[in-house]
Amino acid sequence: MERSVHAITSLTGLDAAMAKSREARVRLAEAILSGRAIAPGDVAILNTVLKAILDAPRRGGRAQLETGQGRSIDFDLTFETRSLEQDLVFCTRGEAALIDLLAAREPGFAAETAAGIEALGGRRWRCLLADRDGTLLDYCGRYASSVQPAWNAVFLARFCREKTERAIMLTSGPLENGGLPSVTTLPPGTMDLAASKGREWLTRDGTRGAVPLPPAAAARLDELAERLAALLARPDYAVFSRIGSGFQRKHGELTIARQDAFGSVDAGESARFLDAVRKLVGEIDPTEKHLSIEDTGLDIEISLAASGRAFDKGQALDILDAALSLDLARGPILVCGDTAADLSMLRAALDRTPDVQALFVTRSETLAEVVRSLCPEAVCVGAPATLMAILNGLAGR
Ligand SMILES: [Mg+2]
């Protein structure tokens, strides 16, 4: 019998639907990994969410969603739609059908997968260090929507269980308040989750930890966070907490979106918001000594001004190695990333042991060359789906 479907018409509705899909995906991944039959009700949830997204009012191929205060914005929901389609194929028609679907969408998928499996071979790794967005998963227009597909969790968990002693996801997103755990569908205990570029973490046994911040610096950042929250409560700025990266209160850093990857917000409005945030930061740190503000064009990132090198994933590894008893010096280590920001993680691994292999997602020959200069045997592929198919293929060897 056909379920009644309510089209999604607002961002609030989209968030609720994606959260529901996450719960179903957690159960689906768990069932598949443990060889149990999947519950038809969970597949029905994914079907319902997909239909509700496809039925959203459209304008120029994008979904037109209410964002509050009587306004609406056009969103590109490609990530949400595609990942639901992939999960439905995986859960109803099986792994081979999913691989066919991925191969049809990603140029070079089959050849790159076969070459990657061949190059990385049947090794077991002391540790997997993996970036998330753009590496394990496609980029998504909104962090809140970037729920890990069930198939992705199954492939990743298989690799972690079969081929690694430890596995760390190291990402720049936050841990709390809609952070990494709320968009992850892996069974608990599979990976350690390191967020805020590795400044805070949730270990696979459920222990939380964080790099200590100087109390005065933490208080300053807290004050800024409160005042930013008040700014975002104003009707004219409320939209910026809902698009793209949204408002992320991280450990030692705040991120607030001023645009998303699809240019959903008017450019003038985005520039006015940037000015307002700069003014606020200036009020809290008039001498500009304590806070540094960086504008990526999409996100405004405010962090504690570092004396010397800005905090990166390489410094994070120094901390995590000790805090999580990773014993990275023992190797071998597999490092997965997709941008120049992940190179510091690769370099820090190489500082500990020469026994490091790199698996990168990039179509940039410049980045691929740097990766190969560090790791001559590095494998570079064109898409996160290809990387995941390689990990899944390796798990079976
Ligand atoms: Mg990335």
Image: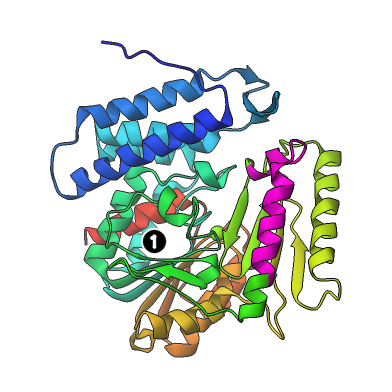
Up-down relation of residue 70 to residue 344 (above or below): above
Query: Which residue occupies 44% across, 47% down?
Result: 109
Answer with left or right where residue 33 lies relative to residue 52.
left
Looking at the rendered image, the quarter that the N terminus falls into is top left
Looking at the rendered image, the quarter that the C terminus falls into is bottom left
Up-down relation of residue 31 to residue 206 (above or below): above
- Secondary structure predominantly adopted by residues drawn in magenta: helix
Q: What span is colored magenta in the figure?
A: 220-241
Residue 366 is drawn in which quadrant? Answer: bottom right
Q: Which residue is mark 1?
A: 116
Residue 17, image x and y in percent? Answer: 44, 31
Query: Which residue occupies 24% across, 27% down?
Result: 41
Query: Which residue occupies 42% across, 38% down?
Result: 19
**Is residue 352 visible to us here?**
yes
Question: Helix or strand or loop: what does disc 1 sit on?
Answer: helix
Q: Nearer the viewer, residue 41 or 327?
A: 41
Q: Residue furthest top?
A: 1
Residue 131, image x and y in percent? Answer: 48, 63
Up-down relation of residue 278 to residue 15 (above or below): below
Residue 139, image x and y in percent? Answer: 55, 48
Answer with left or right where residue 150 lies relative to residue 379.
left
Answer with left or right where residue 172 lies relative to residue 17.
right
Residue 63 is drawn in which quadrant? Answer: top right
Residue 374, image x and y in percent? Answer: 54, 80
Residue type beneath disc 1: Gly
Q: Splitting the image into four quadrants, where does ligand 1 fall?
A: bottom right
